[in-house]
Amino acid sequence: MSARVRPVCAAAVAVALAAATMAPDAVAAPPPGESASALPGQPPESSASVLLTQLQTLYRQAEEATEAYKTTDVELKRLEAEDKKLDASLASARAALARERGAAGRLAREQYQGRGDLSGYLRVLLADDPQSALDQGHVLAHAAGERRAAVDRLTRGERQAAELARASRRALEEQQALAQRQQREKDDVELRLKEVEKLLAELSPEQLAELARLEQRGTDRAQRDLLSSGALSGTRAPSSEGDRALTYAVDQIGKPYVWGAEGPESYDCSGLTSQAWAHAGRAIPRTSQEQWAELPHIALTSLRPGDLVVYFPKATHVAMYLGGGLVVQAPRPGARVKVSPIAANPLLGAVRPDPAADPLTLSAYHPPRLPEGAAQGVDTGYSSEDEPN
């Protein structure tokens, strides 16, 4: 269910997308099919800005399609689990209905054979002993009550079985519709990534170098401004769960980004964060948008290792805070899980999966050891707006 960018383009992807804090004079992307490198009369930086804008637009479209795919996948899994429960309930209801039908058939046979209420009632009327007649009357009343109850159970069972059968059919129809939508969304992601590949394949080494320079300049400026603001001042320790989640995330450094992937060999951005916290013993939502919507928000001034940092206005990217102004993230196709500056992408805010958990003491916390080259590679993720932020 995953689409990888071809290796020939991986190096190009790794330098092609600038940070959202890039130079504000970027111009609009050329029309589809027109090469930005062919635009006449533009200085190299302006040409690179055009390419940057076009790439951001393509990556935004791919990311939004990816988020739609992941959301559909989560809903499809929920419906599949619900359908299994409905099937089990329907089987149980049908078994109970078969038993009640058997009981009703037995009652009908007894009535037909003269062992029903009327013949019993006549025997009571003809009895010589009044007490015996009264006792038999109680017995017959009890038997009649049991027969009425059996008929009521049969009626309720038939109604329940019919309702469960209708619900099961609806669930199946919804599953089929979601599966079709999921396939369309998967195809859309693959189309967007192919468009990125095509554009990157047309870039010259000079254009790639200029894109890399613009990207790094924007990241450095944003990181410098954030750190100088004092928003991340102070040293904090994670909770015990946050420590385990962060250790897991660090252990994944170097593994490739693949859209829709949840490990263990590859990840997308929210696949990494959700699996890291799952391995710490706490289930969190699957997508970055759900993580932003459902987990408790915290101020950047309160960030501690293990917290999740969410990016872009539509919450289409997420990373895990490492401490010291750094995050662990799966940036985008063609990149690998790595350590990045927290401000490499435009910040939306932060969330904490375990808000009630106390942090470890600083003396008891030992940050995970980073592998060699943990910070190498592209830092930026996806923009969710038509224009660079």
Image: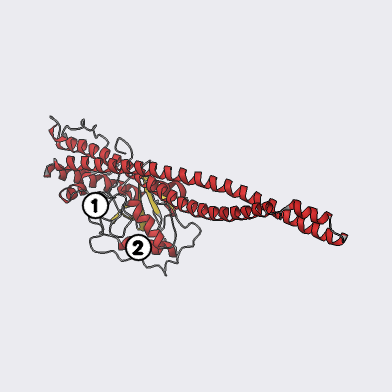
Q: Residue furthest bottom?
A: 364
Q: Residue 348, can we see it?
A: no
Q: Disc 1 marks which amino acid?
A: Ala
* Residue depicted at 54% across the width and 45% down the height: 162
Q: Residues within 10 Å of mark 1 (few under 14, many from 20)?
A: many
Q: Residues within 10 Å of mark 2 (few under 14, many from 20)?
A: many
247 to 162, vertically: above or below: below
Badge 2 marks a residue whose secondary structure is helix
Quadrant of the image occupied by residue 133: bottom right
Q: Nearer the viewer, residue 22 or 115?
A: 115
Number of callouts: 2
> Would residue 214 be found to the left or right of residue 72 on screen?
left
Q: CA distance from mark 1 to mark 2?
A: 19 Å
How far across and down, in percent of the image, does residue 140 sit? 76, 56
> Which residue position holds label 1?
335
* Residue depicted at 32% across the width and 61% down the height: 250
191 to 226, vertically: above or below: above
